[in-house]
Image (cartoon, grey):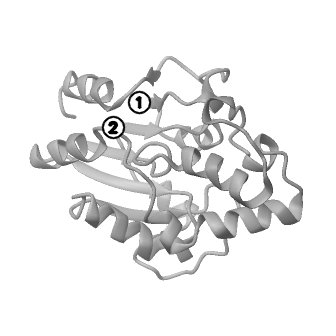
Amino acid sequence: MKIYVDFDDCLCETARSFSELAVEMFGKVVPYEKIRYFELDKSFDLNEEEYKQFMIRGHEPEVLLSYEETPGASEVINEWISLGHEVSIITGRPFSAYEPSRLWLDRHGLQDVRLYCLNKYGRDVFYNNSDFCLELEEYYQMKFDFAVEDSPKAFQYFNHLPNLKVLVFDRPWNRECEFPNANYTRCSDWQSIREIVSGRTPG
């Protein structure tokens, strides 16, 4: 099987760190469970300049490397790889974050997964002819059996795969969203994701 996995808030606890960062940088107190929007400027009530500074700081190498792993992520992904499944981490992080993101994966025992940067949210200027940077046309040529994703804004990138099973990692900002169809399943943790994937005969 081919499996798509998002990085932030699927593999690691990015939003929990951003909640602390908002206090540190701007004195904005928004506990993790109160983060109601994927758009962080809206969740933390940041103006344009504050948001720009916030995102720059949140993507600095030492900050990226400090994010805690979401419990069970590396164990389940390595189990999939050992069973012969193909796992691709497809992140909306800017390409400038590729190297520390790759290092984070390696440090967490995920040396065998492929990492790609896809400009999901229009935040980055991407570079052609990179092995790790996907243009949308390239991404739409890829096929997956399962996807693990937390962001409702990313659901549009699954429309070309009518049989894809989307496992939505439960987060405060996606609890009120409507799923596009019955292929979407809310999952509370990596154990529930493992169980769903293991129950399907490889295609």
Measured in 3D between alpha carbons, the distance from the residue under mark 1 to the one under mark 2, in whole angstroms, is: 7 Å
Picture quadrant of residue 151: top right
Q: Marks 1 and 2: which is nearer the front?
A: 2
Check residue 163 in the rendering and tell me which mark sits there, or answer none.
1
Give above or below for 131 relative to 203: below
Relative to the observer, which residue lies in front, 27 or 191? 27
Picture quadrant of residue 47: bottom right
Residue 41 in the image, given as x and y percentages of width and height: 79, 50
Kindly identify the residue that appears in the image at 40 percent across and 77 percent down.
131
**Residue type, numbered disc 1:** Asn
Q: Do tag 1 and tag 2 residues touch (Cβ < 8 Å)?
A: yes
Kindly identify the residue that appears in the image at 78 percent across and 51 percent down.
27
Relative to the observer, which residue lies in front, 69 or 124? 69
Kindly identify the residue that appears in the image at 36 percent across and 64 percent down.
104
Q: Name the residue that disc number 2 marks.
A: 145
Image quadrant occupied by the C terminus: top left
Residue 140 in the image, given as x and y percentages of width and height: 50, 54
Furthest toward the top, the residue is 182
Give above or below for 58 relative to 17: below
Q: Mark 1 vs mark 2: which is more N-terminal?
A: 2
| Element under disc 2 | loop
